[in-house]
Image (cartoon, helix red, strand yellow):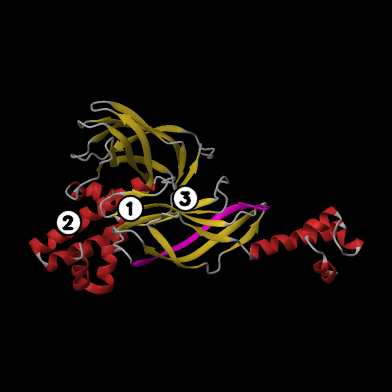
Amino acid sequence: MWGRLAACATLEAALTGRAQCPPQATSLPHIALLLMAAVVASAQSVQRRVDLPADSPVTLVTVDWGDTGATPRGGAFFVDVHAALSLRNSSQKRVRAITMAVLSQEVTPGGKGSVSVPSLDVAPGDTFPLTIDLRLLRPIGTSAPVEVKLDGVLFDDLNFYGPDRLHSRRTLTVWELEARRDRQYFKKVLETAGRDALQKEMLDSLARQADRPQQGVQMVRGRATTTDPERELAFAFLQMPDSPVEAVSGMARVSGNEAHAPRIEVHNRSGRPVRHVEMGWLVKDQQGREFQAASMPADVSLAPGRSAQVMEDAAMRLPGASIQSMTGFVSSVEFADGQFWIPSRVALTDPKLRKAVAPSPEEQRLTQIYLKKGPAGLIEELKKF
């Protein structure tokens, strides 16, 4: 029977009665088998491509799609994208960071993702790797290929190239400013206090990273789903003396292990107009453990001396625990002229802030260099900048 099915020209021909195969092959059981065969074939073979603009400052050298494939689950596919790209800096500037969008179906929830690589230092003409390991969703019956597209590239002069559909310019710029802040701090430690002091800073950072809770916090759009009684819970705030924006008050609706509809009033205490504020959101469970729940970005039009509300249409879920308290803090500010504010290293020496704010991607990278190459390797890395 399977041999007769294989001899049919196409699934479409079988379904329309134009197949050149025995009549019994177009019965409902055989059509079901053909449909199953089509699903299996689709799962085994996923079209994929890397799509870069003609004037892109990075060009594709090689791509290995590995075991990229799709697995049927109910009425959709899980699309596992595993790709290793080699890219060349084709510009005349040094590349500091990059974001690539990965799409299996742009309009479907779960159909798109992204990969960002901060803390790069790629000279003109040099190549660098970019690894993609993502799981996306795609409805069964969709034939669009998996696409990898450039969302943005940040250069050493902080100029940006790309469509920025994922708002990666802001994220990559903040990461680069944090990287410069942290490298300068560690270089100053080396210059003023020596190698032993730098080594102590690395050990302290590693201990801080190890102490951070690993429990996953889930973010979902819309309202929470728990049936526990709901209450309003006020935010406490960590204040940074040099922040141009101050968090004044805030509330969220809390029910059991879920919180939703956070809203925070912020005040511009600087003399410059502000167009974007990012708030950090921390939660503490009944055992006293604190978790970085989310980042709350908000576009605002905030003149000097004015206030506005930061709101998020999302729910935060803390698996296996109940929310007892919440804390917020201003993590970055973008002014109307495109300049940014980020917390200083001095501000981050405050014990509460040091515990709340995660080490930057650059600090984590430097500690890994220290682990692999020791103090000498770390010092050589710091001398590059």
Q: Which amino acid does label 3 sit on?
A: Gly
Q: Which amino acid does label 2 sit on?
A: Tyr
Q: Which amino acid does label 1 sit on?
A: Leu
State which quarter of the image contains the N terminus.
bottom right
Please, what secondary structure does the residue beneath circle 2 have? helix
**Disc assigned to residue 185:** 2
Residue at 21% in and 56% down:
182
State which quarter of the image contains the C terminus.
bottom left
- Please name the residue that numbered disc 3 is placed on: 320
Q: In which quarter of the image is residue 72?
A: bottom right
| Closer to the eye: label 3 or 1 | 1
Residue nearest the observer in this picture, 262 or 300: 300
- Please name the residue that numbered disc 1 is placed on: 154
The percent coordinates of residue 252 (x first, y second) are: 41, 34
The percent coordinates of residue 34 (x first, y second) are: 78, 61
Decide which of tag 3 and tag 1 comes sooner along the chain: 1
Main secondary structure of the magenta stretch: strand
The magenta span reads 126-142
| Closer to the eye: label 1 or 2 | 1
Residue 131, magenta (yes or no):
yes
